[in-house]
Image (cartoon, grey):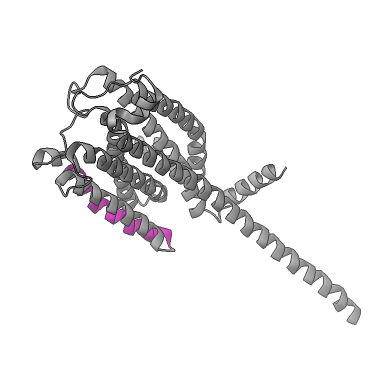
Amino acid sequence: MQFDSFSTFLDMGGYGFFVWLSYGVSITALALLVFSSLSSHKKIKQQIVQRQKRETKLRQAAEQQKAQAQPSAEQSS
Amino acid sequence: MMWKWLHPYANPETSYHFAGKILPWCSRLAFIFLSIGIVWALLFAPADYQQGDTFRIFYLHVPAAMLSMGIYLGMAIAALSSLVWQLKLADASAAAMAPIGATFTFIALVTGAAWGKPMWGTWWIWDARLTSELILLFLYLGVIALHNAFEDKSLAGKAAGILALVGVINLPVIKYSVEWWNTLHQGATVSKIGQPSMTADMFWPFLICFIGFSLLVTALICVRFRTEILNRNSMRPWVRELVMQEENTHAV
């Protein structure tokens, strides 16, 4: 251990501001990168799921329409 | 021979699952190495006899700078193989690497400025090493912008790939700038051939930090590479099945 107390640790031999600025900015930048990488991975999956759900809904609607159209066609004949 | 071995990895589905398999190991190891390395660097490594405790910035600055160049080299190799052999996956990996490299370049520049202010008396100076590293940041930003500029991903990959390849010329300039020009920046400490010119109690925390950051980069490349694969293959049956399966297991 290079430091006697917590305050000398924070002080960093008088260079505290520069050392903590470096560590702070680096950790923040990396945390943002990790967060944005994970969230864009989740987002693309959700987009693909949404599109498939929309497709199945459209398909079901088309089938229903067809099913409704056919009996009426039989009645009229 | 090599092509036979590489062939299954040219399949996006295989690569997606391969990246998914190594991802948890890389992220766990990165966490362990970085925790040990940073605690060591901040608390246990000795202060430099000339630079005092500002030397603790070294443990972030040098790994970030080395990785900013290493990632660029990887991205340029991926861009070359995409342009020459039309490997779509190489495009995806180049697109995955660009934002990670840009972040590490940014970290190298900021930590360098915060180290320069107390040691040289200035945050910034337009000398060879600093200017060429700033150009590296702009190259990364250009590559990212080109990847996002076109709806057609293969066209975007081509444009970004050409820029990445042209920018390779900047790498030797950064590496040798401290020898070619008179500069405030100090010469190489770690990457010298033979013995690094530093004591063991400074070298070990550096090495552990460097390995930790490299593992973090690998883990991040895996995540972003998987995202790029999904984005480029979103209409393929295997992707559709995979995301629906995951959606259902999460819903339950």
Q: Is residue B35 left or right of residue B176?
A: right
Start-end of magenta stretch: B152-172
Give the quarter of the figure containing the N terminus of chain A. top left
Residue furthest right in the image: A75
Whole-percent x and y of residue B32?
45, 26
Q: Is residue B188 magenta?
A: no
**Residue nearer the viewer, B116 or B219:** B116
Q: Is residue B46 above or below residue B147?
A: above
Main secondary structure type of the part rendered in magenta: helix
Q: Is residue B135 above or below residue B197?
A: below
Total number of numbered discs in the rendering: 0
Q: Is residue B18 left or right of residue B42?
A: right
At 31% from the left edge and 29% from the top edge, which residue is drawn?
A: A12
Give the quarter of the figure containing the C terminus of chain A. bottom right
Q: Is residue B119 above or below residue A44?
A: above
Whole-percent x and y of residue A35?
49, 44
Q: In this rendering, does residue B226 appear at all?
A: no
Residue furthest bottom in the image: A76
**Residue nearer the viewer, B103 or A4:** A4
At 39% from the left edge and 30% from the top edge, which residue is drawn?
A: B212
**Residue nearer the viewer, A46 or A4:** A4
Q: Is residue B185 left or right of residue B104?
A: left
Whole-percent x and y of residue B42?
35, 26
Q: In this rendering, does residue A43 appear at all?
A: yes
Whole-percent x and y of residue B108?
29, 41
State which quadrant residue B210 falls in.
top left
At 26% from the left edge and 49% from the top edge, which residue is drawn?
A: B136
